[in-house]
Amino acid sequence: MHASTLDAPDHDHDHDGGGREPDPDQRATALLEQARHLVEPALRAAVTTLPTAMHRVAAYHLGWQHPDGTPARADGGKALRPALVLAAARALGAPPAAAVPAAAAVELIHNFTLLHDDVMDRDATRRHRPTAWSVFGTADAILAGDALHALALRLLAQDTHPAATAATARLAACVIELCEGQHEDCAFETRRQVTLAECLAMAQAKTGALLGAACALGALYAGAAPETVEAMNAFGRAVGLAFQLADDLIGIWGDPAVTGKPAGSDLAARKKSLPVVAALASATPAAAQLAALYRDPAPMTAQQVRAAADAVDRAGGRAWAHLAAADHMSAAIDHLTRAAPDLDGAEDLLTLAELATRRDR
């Protein structure tokens, strides 16, 4: 792996037996694993300080415990956001270990949003397990999410790094934007019509904001100039939109064995995701069929979910989403070139960005 990798300088594991560089999936997997290795101790230390009831919910949600409190080794998420923090710091010349508090704070904010989103969306599963609210109840899941939010800000407030104050303010502003994006997402459910521009703005706030903040915090912890911090923020936001487009595609066509969610779950919930809104705007017969399925107040049958997925595809929503994701990745690379003109040093960031666009789970 290139010398810009997040972890220690020993690269014996970076090549296969033939001496070739690992493929992108191997590189991305290694980066995520290194991020988890660096950040998880800080996460566990922070979560351990919670009151018993909230610690139990948070530890379950993070995959560390079973509902009865016994240790577990469940899926705790990919750690993409903390990996972006560490990779951004590294790309700008800082040791990743110095940015661990910022990376942990970003991951705590991400999981706070997941706990709340699952309650609002009434999702029954996440990461192949029942959601926290379905196990512990709505109130405890909301309170655990609130506690993770507070922990994130406390981590930064107590950090002695010179960038901690600016990072705290930026992350707090990001949370407000996340709330705005979630509000719009919920509001779209009861609106008959949503424009593609509105849907993109919602995705920018709900998903792009946190990936942008992750990259900006890495830049702050590297002591970067304000214009570099903003370029990193713009890079992360563009990656975030590509990530959301990929996630929306998974919400329609993802494999339940891989995603841990029912097939077509977003369609069954009649979510106005980006491919759906693009399809509805196409003024095609397939768009009319999709609109009729979305207007029907009765729960969708499995056959109707399949028909809706087919209508999105025929109306061009699937193809549009793939093209839009590629466009946002291109924009992301432009922003990254401004932040780190030597792209060799930002190879880890590019690897993580590519993972976001081609993800299938």
Image: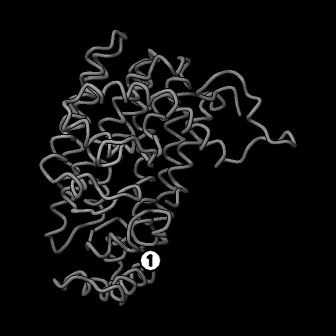
Q: Position of residue 166 (x, y in %)?
A: 29, 19
**Residue shown at the point (80%, 42%) measured from the top left:** 16
Q: How is the image coloured?
A: one colour
- Residue 183 seen in render: yes
| Left or right of residue 33: residue 22 | right
| Residue 19, quarter of picture | top right
Q: Residues within 10 Å of mark 1 (few under 14, many from 20)?
A: many
Up/down of 205 relative to 214, above or below: below
- The answer to which of 134 and 323 lies nearer the viewer is 134
Amino acid type of the residue tagged 1 in the rendering: Gly
Q: Which residue is mark 1?
A: 316
Q: Position of residue 262 (x, y in %)?
A: 38, 71
Q: How many marks?
A: 1
Judged from the image, the secondary structure of the residue bearing numbered disc 1 is loop
Quarter in which the N terminus is drawn: top right
**Residue shown at the point (19%, 65%) measured from the top left:** 188
| Residue 104, quarter of picture | top left
- Residue 239 seen in render: no
- The answer to which of 117 and 184 lies nearer the viewer is 117
- The answer to which of 182 and 103 lies nearer the viewer is 103
| Left or right of residue 11: residue 261 | left
**Residue shown at the point (26%, 72%) measured from the top left:** 269
Q: Position of residue 66 (x, y in %)?
A: 35, 47
Q: Position of residue 225 (x, y in %)?
A: 42, 17
| Left or right of residue 17: residue 92 | left
